[in-house]
Amino acid sequence: MELIKIIIAILLPPLGVFLQVGIGKHFWLNILLTLLGYIPGIVHAIWVIAKNK
């Protein structure tokens, strides 16, 4: 299941964060990072998924 979340995080970073932690500060931060640049959103999403295993 973690591999699927990481693949989703690469394609749609906010969705990957949402699936891991729900709507909270990490979700909104990830949306902001994704809007500012796609790569920072991906990095943050993968970090959140790896941290909350």
Image (spheres, helix red, strand yellow):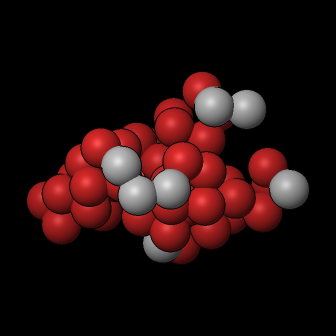
Q: Which is nearer the eye, 1 or 42?
A: 1
How many labels sit on residues? 0
- Is residue 39 in sight in this rendering? no
Location of the C terminus by quadrant is top right
Above-or-below relation of 3 to 25: below
Residue that appears at 54% across and 48% down: 21
Q: Is residue 34 left or right of residue 36?
A: right
Residue that appears at 60% across and 27% down: 51
- Is residue 11 in sight in this rendering? yes
Q: Is residue 26 left or right of residue 19?
A: left
Q: Which is nearer the eye, 11 or 28?
A: 28
* Extreme residue in the front direction: 23
Give residue 25's quadrant in the image.
Answer: top left
Q: Return the x and y of residue 33 as percentages of the image width and height.
A: 22, 53
* Extreme residue in the left direction: 36
Location of the N terminus by quadrant is bottom right
Q: Return the x and y of residue 42 as percentages of the image width and height.
A: 43, 53
Above-or-below relation of 51 to 7: above
Above-or-below relation of 35 to 21: below
* Extreme residue in the top direction: 51
Above-or-below relation of 39 to 46: below
Q: Which is nearer the eye, 49 or 25?
A: 25
Q: Return the x and y of residue 45 as percentages of the image width and height.
A: 47, 48
Q: Return the x and y of residue 50 as percentages of the image width and height.
A: 64, 33
